[in-house]
Image (spheres, grey):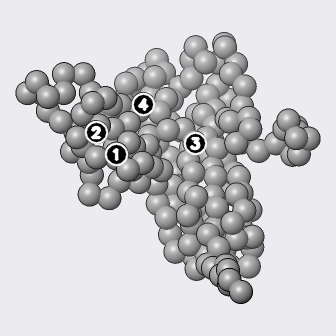
Amino acid sequence: MSNSSFLRATPFGYGAGHVQPNRAADPGLVYDANTTDYLSFLCALGYNSSVIATFMAGAGDGHEVHACPARPRPEDLNYPSVAVPHLSPTGGAHTVTRRVRNVGPGGATYDAKVHEPRGVAVDVRPRRLEFAAAGEEKQFTVTFRAREGFFLPGEYVFGRLVWSDGRGRHRVRSPLVARVVNTKKKHISIA
């Protein structure tokens, strides 16, 4: 698939794929992002609590104001795609946490299958999510590590995480995106 510039398309261009309406009616798992997730995302973008209060209904009339976390990170938004744009080239780990909710008719078990981005090792913990009932929520982590000698600094690379119930009925796909930072600084000299 090509993008509008006739270059090879990436998940930046097509996202997680096309919606299949029949399957969307019974997705199996969903990533629920709540108000706190989005407010913390705004904190990570540089907004402070007083500015965020202008977005909140009832702010300033005695209602609770959102306190920004000590070290907010935009990649912590509970969103289906997982992007790590500042991965260390030395193999240091970068871990992101996600939550999924079982919206199936009852208990279910999902196993993770990872297609790693080129030059990046990805570890998902736990590899199996066991839900006792519908509505139950589980948390998992995705850890990224650059593989020395197998990446191009500054280039975005793509993979995917697929949670499958093993019966072929539910496959929940999440794009994985990583960019290993370039540690070589460019210096401009003025003559």
Disc 3 and disc 1 in contact, CB within 8 angstroms: no
Determine the CA span between mark 4 and mark 1: 23 Å
Q: Nearer the viewer, residue 77 or 167?
A: 77
Mark 3, Cα crowd under 10 Å, few <14 / some 14-19 / many 20+, is: some
Q: Which residue is mark 1?
A: 47
How far from the left and from the top, in percent, is residue 98?
44, 45
The secondary element bearing badge 1 is classed as loop
Disc 4 and disc 1 in contact, CB within 8 angstroms: no
Q: Is residue 63 above or below residue 157?
A: above
Disc 3 and disc 2 in contact, CB within 8 angstroms: no
Q: Who comes first in sequence, dot 3 or dot 2? A: 2
Q: Is residue 92 left or right of residue 155?
A: left
Q: Amino acid at mark 4?
A: Asp
Q: Who comes first in sequence, dot 4 or dot 1? A: 4
Q: Which residue is mark 3?
A: 81
Q: Is residue 110 above or below residue 90?
A: above
- Residue drawn at x 14%, y 32% is 64
Please give the label number shown on residue 32: 4
Q: Which residue is mark 2?
A: 51
- Rendering quarter of residue 23: top right
Q: For marks 3 and 1, give the one nearer the viewer.
A: 1
How far from the left and from the top, in percent, is residue 174?
61, 41
Determine the CA span between mark 4 and mark 3: 13 Å
- Residue drawn at x 72%, y 25% is 18
